[in-house]
Amino acid sequence: MAAGKGSRCPNCGAPTDPAFRPFCSQRCKDVDLNRWLKGAYSIPVVEDDDLPTDEDETDGRA
């Protein structure tokens, strides 16, 4: 997404400030960083128990 005229802050929707692009302010920039640091943007993983593990693939030899 280009950050030209009409770009909006992804946090609050206010017009972006070139000094804090793609955000509108230092506050919104810090809010986004805090979300990254807390893991809010993580992708949930579903474990599949049917897949073979490394232990299943070895035949007991070292």
Image (cartoon, grey):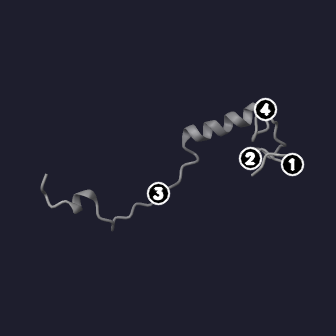
The residue pinned by badge 1 equals: 6
> Callout 1: helix, strand or loop?
loop
Q: Which of marks 3 and 4 is in front?
A: 4
Outermost residue, left side: 61
Measuring from the top left, give residue 1's x and y in whole percent.
75, 52
Q: Marks 2 and 1, Cα distance to the nearest angstrom?
A: 12 Å
> Callout 3: helix, strand or loop?
loop
**Splitting the image into 4 quarters, where does residue 47 fall?**
bottom left
Is the C-beta separation of discs 3 and 4 under 8 Å?
A: no
47 relative to 5, above or below: below
Is the C-beta separation of discs 3 and 2 under 8 Å?
A: no
Residue 38, numbered circle = none
Amino acid type of the residue tagged 3 in the rendering:
Val
Nearer the N terminus, badge 4 or badge 1?
1
- Please name the residue shown 66% across and 39% down the image: 32
25 relative to 61, above or below: above
The residue pinned by badge 3 equals: 45
Q: Marks 3 and 4, Cα distance to the nearest angstrom?
A: 36 Å
Outermost residue, bottom side: 50
Residue 19, numbered circle = 4
- Please name the residue shown 73% across and 37% down the image: 28
39 vs 5, left or right, is left
Amino acid type of the residue tagged 1 in the rendering:
Gly
